[in-house]
Each structure stands twice: as C-alpha cells, then as structure tokens.
Amino acid sequence: MAAYDDLDVKRIFVVGIASVVVTAVTALAVQVVYYAMAQQQKAETAAASNYARQLSILKEQKDEISTYGVDELTGKLVIPVNDAMEIISSETGSDA
C-alpha cells in the first residue's frame, strides 16, 4: 500500500504565478478607475464652483486702493496706489 505523496509542484507554481498576475492587474485596474473618478469629480466640482464671495472681497480691496480719501483713524490722506507709485518714481527719477 504505497501512497503517492509527491506534491504537484508545477500546478502550485502555475496557480501562484496566476494569482500574482491577477492581483497585480486588479490593483492597476482599481487605480485607473480611482484616478478617472477623481479627475471627473474634480472637474464637476470646478464647474459647480462659485467664487462670488472671493470676487466681492477682491472688488472691495481694489476699490479701497483705488480711491482718494482720509483715514478716519489717523487723519492721513489716502491716495490710489498707482498715483503713489507715480509720485515716488517721479521723485526718485529727478534725484538721480
């Protein structure tokens, strides 16, 4: 009653290699699907974005630096930034 106890090494090797290949292909497929969905979500979010609050803040800041007036706290004269730059450049240009 001799029992055949040898393992089928060839079949184990083939199944092992096939398992590694299937796992690698599955991981790559999941990664491709993830990045495609992430890109689609980013595009949808960007399309649905509304920058009204940020644009209103920028408009207020632009108006603030573009007008003449008097600072209520210090009593100093306020002039637009472009005018201040022209004055400074003309003063430094005449000194040279």
Image (spheres, rainbow, N blue to C red):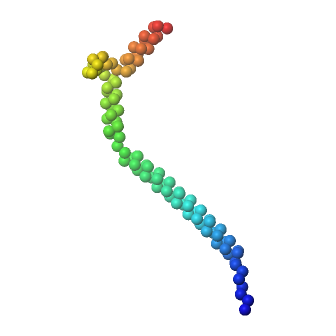
**How far from the left and from the top, in percent, is residue 71?**
28, 20
Q: Is residue 35 above or below residue 2?
A: above
Task: Name which quarter of the figure residue 91 lies in.
Answer: top left
Q: Residue at x 38, y 20 (%)?
A: 82
Q: Nearer the viewer, residue 11 or 74?
A: 74
Q: Quadrant of the N terminus?
A: bottom right
Is residue 31 shown above or below 93? below
Q: Residue furthest front?
A: 1
Q: Residue furthest top?
A: 95
Q: Is residue 69 visible?
A: no
Which quarter of the picture shows residue 73?
Answer: top left
Residue found at the very far right of the displayed protein: 2
Q: Position of residue 50 (x, y in %)?
A: 34, 43
Please, which residue is most extreme toward the left here? 72
Residue 6 is situated, as x and y percent measured from the top left of the image, at: 72, 80
Q: Residue 79, percent across and down?
A: 33, 18
Residue shown at the point (34%, 24%) measured from the top left: 65
| Picture mark count | 0
Q: Is residue 50 left or right of residue 1?
A: left
Residue that appears at 43% across and 52% down: 41
* In this rendering, position of residue 14 left or right of residue 40: right
Task: Judge from the rendering whether residue 64 lies leftward or rightward of residue 36; answer left or right.
Answer: left
In this rendering, the answer to whether 41 lies above or below 23 is above
Q: Residue 2, relative to residue 33: is it above or below?
A: below
Q: Residue at x 73, y 89 (%)?
A: 2
Q: Is residue 61 left or right of residue 91?
A: left
Q: Is residue 63 visible?
A: yes
